[in-house]
């Protein structure tokens, strides 16, 4: 099988999965004209039309759908073969596209990446950091670290750690109110809430102390869908917030924020490693996933 035909098969699969020549080209790091030319050459070689092309969307023909299923299986077998050969040599190489929540990237993974590079110098990472829940198959993502319940049936889910949270506010803001002795007194303060982008769902916050529990359910004064903006609002003295403990470490050390009700613990969020069932874990993806699991396990702010 010629190399250019193999690349054309990969391009065709990405177009079917993403429904767009432009998005497929972006995902593969190629020019749109290159991807279009690859698929046209593939159709010419096969003597069949594989794709319906409209101004809004590209979709497979009947022949294209059947071809896609067979080609995807062939490509997965080839990736598995490469993975087994690389694994037997103890060498991981190639590109890995991974997504994770911003706090995980900024305060855990990225600072530790020099260690990953030293261990796997031939692996190239595409790292995405946001609070958005990505579609791994549609966006060509090899694996992701995801917070909270994972209910997507086509994903393998491996819990690897916990994102811990604290209640905090600025010393100046707290000085304007009587000392807090119980979570019920938070009702006297302005509540800054976090909203997950995409779903618009507001984060639920439950405080626990021994057998006691308290749900923060007051009306928020402000809501934010960006982690960076959220903690910036807390640092500006706009009210109290429930932020990731890892993200609060520096503001706490600098005295910009103070932990509120430290004898009460906010419920943590389970962090899981996910990847599509349909994809074999290549040596390069396994190298990252094993390293990320080890990283969380050894960090007291993130370990299970």
Image (cartoon, grey):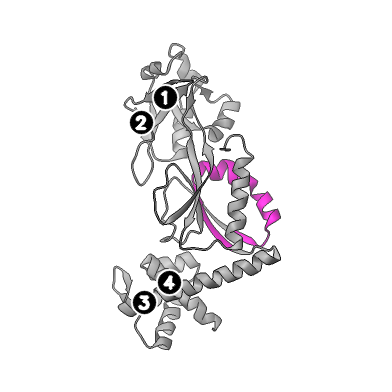
Residue labelled with disc 3: 66
- Look at the picture and state if 269 lies above or below 136: above
Residue 239 got which mark? Answer: 1
Q: Is residue 163 visible?
A: yes
> Marks 4 and 3: which is nearer the front?
3
Q: Earlier in the sequence, mark 4 or mark 3?
A: 4
Q: Quadrant of residue 250?
A: top right
Q: Is residue 226 left or right of residue 250?
A: left
State the residue in front, 260 or 67.
67
> Marks 2 and 4: which is nearer the front?
4
Residue labelled with disc 4: 13
Circles 1 and 2: CB atoms closer than 8 Å: yes
Q: Earlier in the sequence, mark 1 or mark 3?
A: 3
Q: Residues within 10 Å of mark 2 (few under 14, many from 20)?
A: some
Q: Residues within 10 Å of mark 1 (few under 14, many from 20)?
A: many
Q: Is residue 226 magenta?
A: no
Which stretch did the figure color magenta?
Answer: 95-124
Q: Earlier in the sequence, mark 2 or mark 4?
A: 4
Q: Residue at x 62, y 38 (%)?
A: 299
Q: Residue at x 40, y 19 (%)?
A: 186
For the image, the number of numbered tags is 4
Quarter containing the N terminus: bottom right
Q: Quadrant of residue 221?
A: top left
Q: Earlier in the sequence, mark 1 or mark 2?
A: 2
Determine the CA span between mark 1 and mark 2.
9 Å
The percent position of residue 297, horizontal first and vertical second, equals: 61, 41
Determine the CA span between mark 4 and mark 3.
12 Å
Q: Earlier in the sequence, mark 3 or mark 2?
A: 3
The percent position of residue 25, horizontal first and vertical second, equals: 45, 69
Residue labelled with disc 2: 222
């Amino acid at each position: 099988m010629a190399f250019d035909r193999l690349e054309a098969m990969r391009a065709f699969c990405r177009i079917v999965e993403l429904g767009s020549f432009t998005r497929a080209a972006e995902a593969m790091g190629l020019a749109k004209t290159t991807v279009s030319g690859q698929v046209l050459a593939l159709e010419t070689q096969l003597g069949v039309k594989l794709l319906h092309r409209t101004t809004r969307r590209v979709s497979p023909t009947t022949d294209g759908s059947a071809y896609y299923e067979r080609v995807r299986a062939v490509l997965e077998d080839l990736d598995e073969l490469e993975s087994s050969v690389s694994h037997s040599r103890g060498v991981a190489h190639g590109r890995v596209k991974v997504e994770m929540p911003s706090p995980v990237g900024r305060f855990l993974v990225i600072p530790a990446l020099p260690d990953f590079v030293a261990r796997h110098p031939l692996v190239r990472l595409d790292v995405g950091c946001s609070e958005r829940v990505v579609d791994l198959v549609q966006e060509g993502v090899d694996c992701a670290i995801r917070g909270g319940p994972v209910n997507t049936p086509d994903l393998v889910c491996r819990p690897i750690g916990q994102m811990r949270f604290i209640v905090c506010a600025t010393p100046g803001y707290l000085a304007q109110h009587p000392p807090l002795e119980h979570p019920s007194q938070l009702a006297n303060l302005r509540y800054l809430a976090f909203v997950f982008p995409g779903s618009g769902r507001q984060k639920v916050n439950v405080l626990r102390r021994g057998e006691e529990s308290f749900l923060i359910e007051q009306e928020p004064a402000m809501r934010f869908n960006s982690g960076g903006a959220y903690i910036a609002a807390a640092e500006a003295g706009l009210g109290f917030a429930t932020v990731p403990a890892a993200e609060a470490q520096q503001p706490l050390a600098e005295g910009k924020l103070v932990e509120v009700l430290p004898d009460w613990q906010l419920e943590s969020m389970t962090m899981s490693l996910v990847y599509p069932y349909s994809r074999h874990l290549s040596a390069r993806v396994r190298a990252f996933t094993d390293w990320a699991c080890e990283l969380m396990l050894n960090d007291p702010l993130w370990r299970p």
